[in-house]
Image (cartoon, helix red, strand yellow):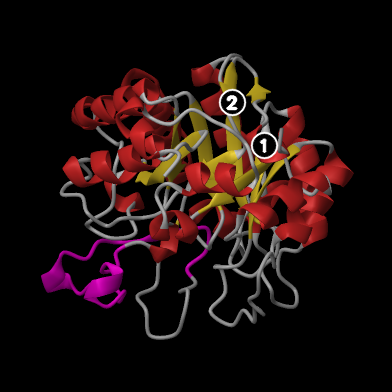
Amino acid sequence: MALLFEPIKIRSIELKNRIIVSPMCEYSSIDGFANDWHLVHLGSRAVGGAGLILTEAAAVSPEGRITPDDLGIWKDEHIEFLKRITKFLEENGTVPGIQLAHAGRKASHSSPWKGSKALQNDEGAWQTLAPSAIAYKAGEPLPREMNKDDIDKVINDFSAAAERGLKAGFKVFEIHAAHGYLINEFLSPLSNKRSDEYGGQFENRIKILVEIVEAVRKVIKKDLPLFVRISATEWIEGGWNIEDSVELALILKAKGVDLIDCSSGGNSHNQKITLGALYQVPFSEKIKKESGILTGAVGLITTAEQAEEILAKGQADIIVIARQFLRDPYFPLHAARELNVDIPWPLQYERAKKA
């Protein structure tokens, strides 16, 4: 059996394979509600054989949205349609997971096909929040520096969102602490210039994430897996780096986090990244080997052979795929064929399996 198709059990949840659908923003919601697009988008990847499907970033509050079109989980009314999605995913053999997020200073923007620009007042702009009043890039509105009440609200928002996620039927929870969004902004010394208990030294800058982890773990109890997505490096001198990420992973492991989803970048407009196949895999390898926590490899992984090699080398425990799943919703079925593994196909598709 290829390693890619070996099951993995994390707490009480078993994934049938190591192929994970990464959170991918669809910018297709109205007032945060999931709809038929999300059902078909996520459902087709379940039919395609993924072991775990993570929703796109689900905003824990209206002000935590990247755009007005983001998926949300800040009110109970969001639960009903999400429950329809999780039911379909489970009926088709896939574990449903949700990514909980707050966009911080990168909120209040238009969707990509609308320009990805900061919203103007006549476009429904809202006040963004951040650890410090520093814009992501020149020309954008300044975020408001958060006070302690704001921080407490964010922690409570993540907790309440996790409660709703449970009611909606999600079995894996991921906290989004990457890509320059709110939690990542606190972690980085480039965007966090606070002088209180949430700023300054490493232990203070990670404090909000640790408190969110504790709050979410309390909600989902000991049974369900908890992941954290991080930017393992900021790709800029003086920023958060891989050594920081290893130290953070050790702390999060002790707090009940099961897996680090190892992405990178997104917090500095001046980052310099050399893109290439598997360019982020060394981050998952280093964090896994030096902290002992499970890791997910991400970033331009496009073939079954690449994924299998990552697992064979012990560089990660799961393979988290985004764009290749946009190109091919049935990537796991095709990967199994390429690796000479016989896996079940949906009964409705069986007649095409040997063609």
Relative to 284, does residue 214 appear above or below in the rendering? above
* Residue 195 appears in the figure: no
* Residue 250 appears in the figure: yes
Distance Cα–Cα, label 1 vs label 2 = 8 Å
Crowd tier of the residue under label 2, counting other residues whose Cα lies within 10 Å: few below 14, some 14–19, many 20 or above: many
First in sequence: mark 1 vs mark 2 = 2
Main secondary structure found in the magenta portion: loop
Residue at 53% across / 41% down in the picture?
Answer: 175
**Which image quadrant is residue 91 in?**
top left
Q: Is residue 100 left or right of residue 37?
A: right
Depth check: give the residue in front, 167 or 270.
167
Residue occupying the far right of the picture: 290
Residue type highlighted by circle 2: Pro
The magenta segment: 108-133
What residue did someone put label 2 on?
A: 225
Q: Is residue 188 left or right of residue 237?
A: left
